[in-house]
Amino acid sequence: MGPGMTTRSNRMAALLIMLGTAAAVGESEPIHAEDAAQMITVNPQTLKFIAIPDMPACATAAILRGNPRWGAAWVLLRLASGCQVPWHWHTANETLLVISGRGSVTARDGTPLQFTPGAFAYLPSHHAHHASCARTCVLFNSADAAFDIHYVGANGEEISSEEALRPAPTPAPRPTRRRR
């Protein structure tokens, strides 16, 4: 078996473990009435990742179950290499399980969780945190209520998504000296 096959097998195993864990710790009530009578299956090759409103463009999601606009949902989040999600909080309680990639999530009052496959985080409602990915990250995310995002500034005050997502000013280039 080549290295590409091993990586693919490891990712598939992580996805299956993640889905099994989510099912075991998930809510006892179905997210939608039809969920109670239907088996849900996911083919990773056919997932469609879409932009997430009010999030950085480097963050996309594929909905697995539920509807994050209206209620509880399970989604796969993908944060591209170099992606930074500024300090924010959600109304919903949020769980994260890392499938692949390298990065971290840090809560205001906690130590950073390094993203490695299998790493898990539970973020309670209104708990400020930020995330970054050095190498593209794929995370299983479940939320127990509709998705919202409230960005916070350095002093903990709520700020607009426009302010939070505004690119940092780049310093002016230094003049170069000419050699004679």
Image (cartoon, grey):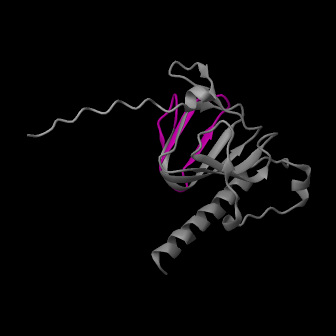
Quick one: 74 or 45, which is closer to the camera? 45
Q: How many marks?
A: 0
Quick one: 96 or 176, which is closer to the camera? 176
Q: Which residues are magenta?
A: 106-134
- Residue 110: x %, y % from top left: 50, 32
Please say whether residue 36 is visible from this viewpoint. yes
* Image position of 83 (left or right of 51): left
* Image position of 37 (left or right of 166): right
Residue drawn at x 61%, y 67% is 12
Residue drawn at x 60%, y 46% is 59
Please say whether residue 114 is visible from this viewpoint. no
- Residue 145: x %, y % from top left: 77, 37
* Image position of 164 (left or right of 102): right
* Quadrant in the rendering for residue 161: top right
131 in the magenta segment? yes
In the image, residue 5 above or below residue 162: below
Residue drawn at x 62%, y 21% is 158
- Residue 169: x %, y % from top left: 43, 29
- Residue 180: x %, y % from top left: 8, 40
In the image, residue 59 above or below residue 41: above
Specify the farthest residue to the front.
Answer: 180
Residue drawn at x 47%, y 36% is 111
Specify the farthest residue to the left.
Answer: 180
Specify the farthest residue to the bottom.
Answer: 1
137 in the magenta segment? no
